Image (tube, helix red, strand yellow):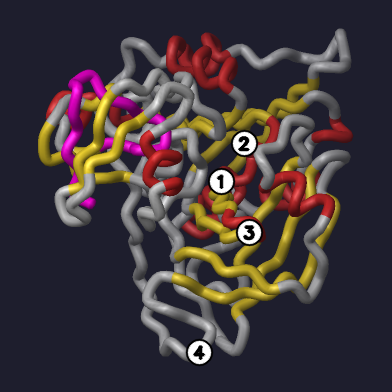
Amino acid sequence: MKQAAPESKQAATWTRKNTMTADIIRTQIRQIRLESEATASFELWPVGEQYLPSFTPGAHIDIHLPGGLRRSYSLINNGGEPRHYNIAVKKELESRGGSSWFHDNARVGMTLDISLPSNDFELIENASHTILIAGGIGITPIISMISRLIELGSSWELHYCARSFAHMAFRDELRSLANCGKGAIHLYVDNLADHKRLDLSAIFGSAASTAHLYCCGPAGMLEAFIAAAKGRQPDTVHYERFAAANAAATDGGFEVKLARDGRTLSVPEGKSILDTLLDAGVDVPYACSQGICGSCVTTVLDGIPDHRDECLSDEQREANKSMMICCSGSRSKTLTLDL
């Protein structure tokens, strides 16, 4: 479960050359492969570097795309000493820019700047049993978890749902992984009337109290997962959203004071704090623009935010010491931010 804004958790060190800055890595697309009817994977290799920073299962990177877009993608491959990073992108009919760019414009040989890996969907490695539940493109952070569980010799099971078998990415790879360790895979598709359906109540009902359960997928699946998890120890339940559960705050009608910049900006109706800052030329980090990835976490010095994110814990929201400026607004007439 997302408990806090993500932080970079790097175990490896490396020599920075002209392809890296303190927090940016220049990579090259070396391979593009179709993984299902609507999903393609992309191999990103460092330009002029032998190794990339290691990462833990469930981690993601932010990718800087043409036109100023930044989007977050889960890392699929093993993170111990990676020679390259693997991501997968589903072609969305209502793309916010990232999906359409990768499927329509990305070519082998192109270079892309990426962030260091970050992880707020950590795998608990000492669980007695691990239950993984994925829907559609939500399989991406789960694959590296399975690889790690196999390395550890741990017990696990996967429940994977998709629209059809044709839309089920990495199916053959997952079957191979299941044959390598103490795992079991259960597949569910929507287009076959007589095919078994996912039963979250049954899964939770049979799960040992020491088992850890993970879910990544569409909003409906996540809400059902959260509802089924009621009564369990919260620290055994983990989930990651690919889309926001709450609409962004765009009512406007308040001011944002920038403590370091010295300016006070009015946030108009129809705009987020992030949009207002960018329009004023304020350079702030951001990626998903939905309050999911945590890239835009900002310290609040005064005022009461209207939290709409999926990153901060309940305790952090009550403290009102930080906020996600891409989606959250203000309950007070003025917010003072450490910018």
Task: Look at mark 4 in the image and give the residue it sits on.
Answer: 18
Q: In this view, does 268 lie to the left or right of 86?
A: left
Residue 325 sits above or below residue 7 on the image? above
Q: Which residue is drawn at 75% across and 35% down?
A: 92
Q: Residue at x 48, y 24 (%)?
A: 270
The mark nearer the N terminus, 3 or 2, is: 3
Q: Which amino acid does label 4 sit on?
A: Asn
Task: Look at mark 1 in the image and give the residue it sits on.
Answer: 141
- The span shown in magenta is 323-339
Residue 82 sits above or below residue 313 on the image? below
Q: Nearer the viewer's eye, disc 1 or disc 4?
A: 4
Report, in whole angstroms, how far the alpha carbon at label 3 lies from the one at label 2.
22 Å
Task: Look at mark 2 in the image and give the residue it sits on.
Answer: 138
Q: Is residue 60 left or right of residue 96?
A: left
Q: In which quarter of the image is residue 27?
A: bottom right
Q: Residue at x 44, y 65 (%)?
A: 116
The mark nearer the N terminus, 2 or 4, is: 4
Q: Is 329 contained in the magenta span?
A: yes
Q: What residue type is labelled 2?
A: Gly
Residue 216 sits above or below residue 48 on the image? above
Label number found at residue 65: 3
Q: Nearer the viewer's eye, disc 3 or disc 2?
A: 3
The mark nearer the N terminus, 1 or 4, is: 4
Report, in whole angstroms, how far the alpha carbon at label 2 lies from the one at label 1.
7 Å
